[in-house]
Amino acid sequence: MRIAIIDDQPDIRYSVAKILKRHGHEAIAFEGTEAELCETLSSQGIDVLIVDVQLGVELSGIDIIRELKKTSQMPIILMTAYTTAQNMIEASKLGVQNILKKPFDEEALMELVAPYEQRAQEESSPEPLDTGESFVGSYETMKEIYRRIGLAANNDLAVLIHGQTGTGKELIAGLIHQNSSRAKHPFVALNCAAIPLELFESQLFGHEKGAFTSAETQHVGYAEQVGEGTLFLDEIGELEPLAQGKLLRFLESRQFRRVGGKEDKVFSGRIVSATNIDLHEKIEAKLFREDLYFRLAMLSIEAPSLKERAQDIPVLVSHFISKANEHLHVEITGVSPLALEALKHRPWSGNIRELRNAVFGACLNRQKGLLKEKDFAGVNVVKVEWEQLLEDALQHALEHNLPYGEIDKIVSHAWLKVAYAATPNLSKLAEALGVARLTLRKRLKEAGLYSEE
């Protein structure tokens, strides 16, 4: 295949081209500053394009893809070392679903290229594979969420976001709105759990003055306020059956009438809803209308719990410390390894919201310097079972095919972690292990378990 590479770094262009040539492909490299680059790519008979997100101050990989998509359906692999929500969502909106995270190895690159080679051999038209802050997290956690946000933002299908309390469902809804063609119009949120049944129509559709006893003035409802924007129906699973029927008729007709009014109005917005309840169970129990569910869930997005994305806790803690420094006017430099270990093993039933509150509270307690375990109210150092810790470490080594020396280092670090958690006093631990205190401190620093106050 003829594969184009666009990257402003010569060493990256050379490395990628070398790998591709080793696998029998023809590699054509560009630095991204060439005049009429898109026209050149279209005329070169390129089968696959590999392009970096960051190319320079005047042009980005996203700019090239956007221009190229006007005239070509060329398969694209996006290289990036900077996985911001905006870039990932924009790439998804443009149909790019193959992301190559820097730094990468030969296997990762060829894994993305191989499907196109197979399609080319079958003489079928190649199409991007479905492989899939704002909302903060690691690349592996966030790539599928960003992909689905991009899909949702690129059309007007009704979206249902489901996930536990505190997982950021409204934040996802906001990102869909901000990245859609409706971004210049209002984003209006309605908490379905907080509205009594008798006020549901009045709040959603509005009412005229004198429509009922307490209607002293005219009220413009949420459906009218949103205009051509996005109406976010939060806690949709809490809606009463009678209100479900009224909502269904509204969604089917896309029309509504103010309570006490005589004129039907057209709804021009889009619907995004969210729930922390298993709606399938409510449907089976005859507590939620199945026809309404299908109207709301044309596209579904799962907001993962913090337990499912525990690997993101260090990233989230760092993010919340930055936010605390900005909004609480404190000067926190980071978090101690032992405190971070305690945070990583806490259940976090309140998910990201609970973690954020815990970090903000700790920052207020400490005010300046490094956060310690005692700064986190109610967050105690937990005992990590050494068998599980060692098993996790060895599993990591096997998955990444690490050499024996690296495995030995991982095992040593795992042992130090257990020992230091059990005996956090350096002098006592050094005496118990039979090593000098300075030697122990050095080893703990190398393992990322100790830092100076």
Image: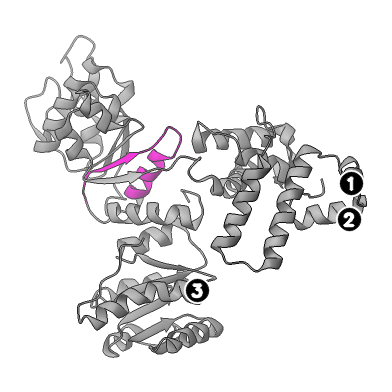
Judged from the image, the secondary structure of the residue bearing numbered disc 2 is helix
Q: Nearer the viewer, residue 387 or 410?
A: 387
Name the element at disc 3.
Answer: loop
Q: Is residue 262 visible?
A: yes
Residue type at mark 3 is Val
Q: Residue at x 52, y 67 (%)?
A: 81
Report which residue position mark 3 lands on.
Answer: 57
Q: Which residue is mark 1?
A: 430
- Image coordinates of residue 53 in percent, x first then y, are 45, 71
| Label annotation for residue 439 | 2
Q: Nearer the viewer, residue 443 or 431?
A: 431
Magenta part of the chain: 156-177
Name the residue type under label 1: Ala
| Residue under the image location 72 percent in, 42 percent down | 338
233, above or below 54, in the image? above
164 in magenta: yes
| Circle 2 residues within 10 Å: few <14, some 14–19, many ≥20 | few
Identify residue type, mark 2: Thr
In contact (CB < 8 Å): disc 2 and disc 1: yes
